[in-house]
Amino acid sequence: MSTMTDNFVPRRKKRITGRSIAILAFLAMCAAFFCIPLYVVIVTSFKTMDQIRLGEIFSLPVTWTLEPWREAWSEACSGIKCEGVSAGFFASLKILFPSLILSLSVSSVTGYALALWNVRWAGTFMFILFMCAFVPFQIIMIPMIILTGKIGVYGTIWGVAVVHAVLALPILTLIFRNFYKDIPGEIMQAAIMDSGSFWRIYREIILPMSANIFIVVLILQITSIWNDFLIGITFGGLNNKPMTVILANTVISATGESSYNVDMAAALLTAIPPLLIYFVLGKFFVQGITAGAIKG
Amino acid sequence: MKLNYTVAAAALMMPLSASAEELVGYHGWSTTSEISALRVLIDAFEAQGNTWVDLAIPHESESNLGLINLITGGNPPNIFVESNPGVYRDLMAMGYGQPVTDLFNDTGVTENLPDAVLQSITVDGEIMKIPTGIHIDGMIYYNLDVAEAAGVDPAGWTSVDDMLADFDKVAEAGYMPIAVGGQSFQVGYLFHALVAAVAGPDIYYRMYQDQPDPTVFDEPAIKEVIELVRTFSELADEGSMNRSWSETTNLVITGQALMHLHGDWMKGEWRAAGKVAGEDFGCINIPGTKALSVTVDAFGILGGVDDETLAAELAWATIVVDPVNTAAFSANKGSSPIRFDAPADALDICNTVVLDALQDPTKGVQNPFNISDGDWHNSIWDVMFNFWSDPTMTSDEAIEELKYSYDAVFG
């Protein structure tokens, strides 16, 4: 706390200066950069196609209609199944939980082992993991298809979960390791002295201390799993197509007619779940990130 | 009599033997028109006792990664929408190719196909693709109300010059003469459609093939086409940059512009807006056209399967090319039927324009994607789009660029 007060400088009286105008203008531009397209997406989703055909994308709907939203949720076609993006919503949930459990458990234990136990070749191992974080998925996709095919999970929920866990492993392990390595050595020594085993220390001491970092990783993973298209489409098989795939089917058409209002509503519906997670857990996210940062 | 019984028994056996078959169909169709078209075929297929397992993934790009992934993972689909001949060559090499040459020859399909279709579905001498519909890469769809208000009759145009001469009249009446979308895809399609229409099939095939003829760039007709592209780019309105084809078509549908020159899948937008061919809009080929570039959408079927599965796959192929089915499919999808003997009452005026033109075997040329190297037509797109976007670039400079690209790709 003392460092906080030392650095505290009373704020000067608010005056409008050239600099603050410049900052405000810059921030307004940044906000507009995201808000204008979002505005177009939102108003388009409430317009009728007749109005959209006229092309004035910035105008407000003449008649507000919820029809596109209803159609996007329950009627839009993905292939011959016309059940809207709602079908994908439940498939996405089915994919989300196994993928989350698998990726979080594997990477937190790996991070814990690498940070707090004397693992032989730990440095080399970390380095390799670190390098792996930079390998684009597309490069290793075909070998992974063959691998998952060989172990018999290709085309199932577990295939998707395994691939999500493996691909997230490098970066999540790094995050967990950096968090755990700041746990004082004395705690570990005391725990080992009390004859705690690897798993018992993890379960009874480390895990209860990890709420912050788990929330950070949870948010990162939920977002990336929910927004994923390529892994779901490649490894999910026939019946496990996530919401993004249904969305792509609804929206992408090379030579077919387009219903922009339904497309926009479907896109918004698909974006809502991760958005909600951010709103609900956002506070913890910042806490978790800064907790890691200050301790170092 | 005995023979008849055998035939009857065989006819009964066919659907029975296929009755347990469950085929996975892989496609990228999801819009209302696409789905209602596909439904025609699936209903006929399931009426025979088969089951269609739907696998829809959009694959509009030319490389169908999804299909290859499914095969690599050991879950290949039985039926797939695919037009790229390269994919069929790959499948053949992997032992998954299944020609339908004999089936089509024996059931009288081949003789009723337009030449352009037959060429397009044939890969290395075997019919590998099961054609679903014909799209023309460059047709003119125009708003009949606007034509009337401006006092022009597009159906009477006999040359591109006629068309351009009428544009002033349209502009004076307060309409945009032509709606264009400034995207490389649209400019690329406009260009090859014009090469076919204005320069003719010989020059077209010298330009678009595995090994293009480098002397083709010095043909005066190529220069003429490039200058025509310039004329169109000068007619573009302010909002044309990066406007999608569907929004561009909507300028015509809503009566702001007279016409749109683009692939005839435009029809889908007109129909979605509740407009009727011949009443609200007219369709013509590029005036004085020497050839039409033809895109043929097609299914492929998986080879290397057991006999029962193969019988069901071939039953699917038979259903797709049935004259009544192809007419119903095309009526829903907005394409034209792939057979000359499709029932006439199922055709709209646009289909008639297309099929009449294709009666002349020299008039149909194949879409560049089907016959030429991907790098080559991509670089043509780049050159033409740069030309479109840069008003200071001359047609001679564009020709130089084409030659330069040719050297880069084939040199």
Image (cartoon, grey):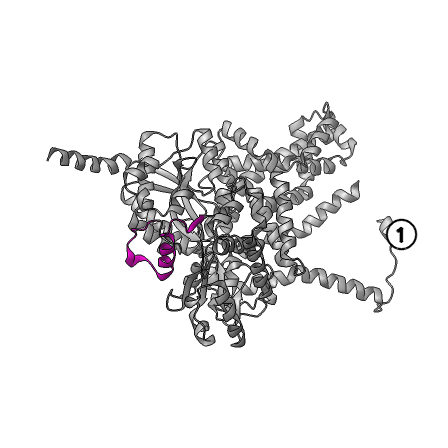
Q: Is residue B16 above or below residue A15?
A: above
Identify the residue at the far left of this view.
B1
Task: Classify the position of the N terminus of chain B by image quarter.
Answer: top left
Question: Percent position (x, y) of residue B368?
Answer: 50, 46
Residue at the disc numbered 1: A6
Query: Looking at the image, which residue is at 41% across and 53% down?
Result: B34
* Residue occupying image coordinates x 79% and y 41%: A295
Image mark 1: chain? A
Q: Is residue B15 left or right of residue A192?
A: left
Span of residues in magenta: B339-365
User: Horizontal placement of B238 versus B314: left or right?
Assistant: right
| Residue placed most toward the observer, B154 or B344 | B154
Q: Is residue B125 magenta?
A: no
Q: Is B352 a magenta residue?
A: yes
Badge 1 crowding class, 10 Å Cα cut-off, few under 14, some 14 to 19, many 20 or more, is: few
Picture coordinates of residue A119 (x, y %)?
72, 24
The residue under the point 14% across, 34% down is: B3
